[in-house]
Image: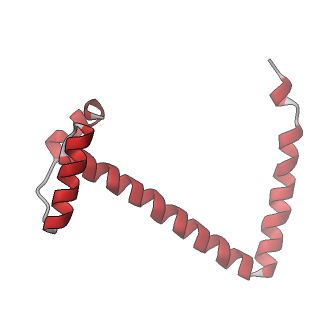
Amino acid sequence: MVSAFDRQRKAQKTVKAFETDIAFINERAKDSECSAAEIIHVLCDDLRKEVYLQELGESFDLLRGNSKQFAKFQAEQEAWDCTLSDGLDDAS
């Protein structure tokens, strides 16, 4: 984990956090043999992914709520589904 973050060390800044969170981050860093900044980076990256997926789900829910738009979406999806059987998987 450490080598992947060497390039980012110059960009590190000081952040304020609650004592319990600092203790958790430091404990995870010690267990993982990396820096606290690396742990924070991983936690932020995980949160970015979680927020993206949540927003994607919410967008899809909105799409399903609009029957006309959802029908268009399904028609396009069906058109692209035929590409799965184009025989390219069998090509070697």
28 to the left or right of 17:
right
* Residue 89 figure quarter: top right
Where residue 47 appears, as percent x and y from the top left, is: 40, 60
- Locate the C terminus by quadrant: top right
Please state the total of marks drawn on the protein image. 0
Q: Residue furthest top?
A: 92
Residue sitting at x 66%, y 76%: 61
Q: Is residue 90 above or below residue 60?
A: above
Above/below status of 49 relative to 71: above
* Quadrant housing the N terminus: top left
Q: Residue at x 73, y 76 (%)?
A: 64
Colour convention: secondary structure
The percent coordinates of residue 3 (x first, y second) are 26, 30
Name the one closer to the observer, 42 or 13.
42
| Left or right: 37 as drawn, with respect to 58 | left
**Most foreground residue, 79 or 21:** 21
Place residue 57 in its image quadrant: bottom right
The relative height of residue 7 versus residue 63 in the rendered view (above or below) is: above
Residue sitting at x 86%, y 54%: 79
